[in-house]
Image (cartoon, helix red, strand yellow):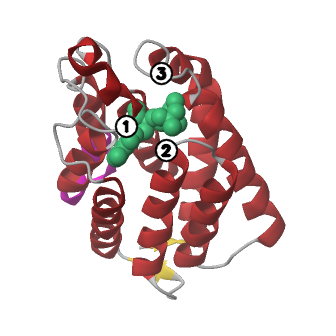
Amino acid sequence: MLDADFFRRWMTATAASVDREAERLTALDSPIGDADHGSNLQRGFTAVAAALEKEAPQTPGAILTLAGRQLISTVGGASGPLYGTLLRRTGKALGDPGEVSEDQFAQALRAGVDAVMTLGGAAPGDKTMIDALVPAVDALGDGFAAARAAAEEGALATTPLQARKGRASYLGERSIGHQDPGATSSALLIAGLAEAAGE
Ligand code: ADP
Ligand code: MG
């Protein structure tokens, strides 16, 4: 079972890795974007960590809902509302229990990823965060380490794609040959799950 501490560890592990990788995320957002993805997420996850410490929500659902709300209110740019929706919708799907099974979490995360696709209109292959998140959710039944590997592979596989959503899509064919920053940060988010699980 996954308790509130697991979800707190997930968010703090993600905040730490986003902090470590912020420069790389911003560098990826420079040829096909506006060079702010790392700083956007760093601001967002710093706010998430601070809010979790201050408000100390006690259930998995409340933790993710609060985290999502922080991302929406602090991250400028496309990725804030999208990541915020992912965590808020996942949190809402988890509901009120103090512990959830890995299966329940996988179902909730799928609802979260579906909500991101509805909000942003992106499908797999459009060179967005969806290209890391969908394979991760598909692999989650095999455990957190499998989800992490699938997300990393999905992020790498965005390089040869042409962007069809977001700022990078304005570049048309010139977006080809660059790894998508949002898919890369999504792989960090999923890696945080394995870290929280001690894998
Ligand atoms: P902005 O593009 O507003 O500067 P960020 O740089 O923070 O925002 O985030 C860019 C990332 O957001 C992209 O690399 C992509 O993965 C993701 N993204 C952009 N638009 C969409 C969308 N419509 N659906 C899903 N993800 C998207
Ligand atoms: Mg940007």
Q: CA distance from mark 1 to mark 3?
A: 12 Å
Q: Amino acid at mark 1?
A: Gly
Residue at label 2?
78
Mark earlier in primary sequence (2, 3): 3
139 or 180: nearer the eye?
180
Are the residues at dot 2 and dot 1 in contact (C-beta closer than 8 Å)? yes
Q: Is residue 8 visible?
A: no
Rounded to the nearest angstrom, the CA distance separating label 2 from label 1 is: 7 Å
Check mark 1 vs ligand 1: CB closer than 8 Å? yes or no. Answer: yes
Indicate yes or no: mark 2 CB to ligand 1 under 8 Å: yes
Left or right of 43? Residue 33 is: left
Q: Position of residue 149 (x, y in %)?
A: 27, 35
* Label 1 vs 3, first from the N-terminus: 3
| Viewer-nearest of discs 1 and 3 | 1
The residue indicated by pointer 3 is 29
Whether residue 47 can be seen here: yes
Write the start and end of the magenta stretch as one range: 140-148
Q: Label 1, secondary structure: give it.
A: loop
- Magenta region includes residue 50: no
Q: From the image, tell me which residue sits under label 1.
A: 166
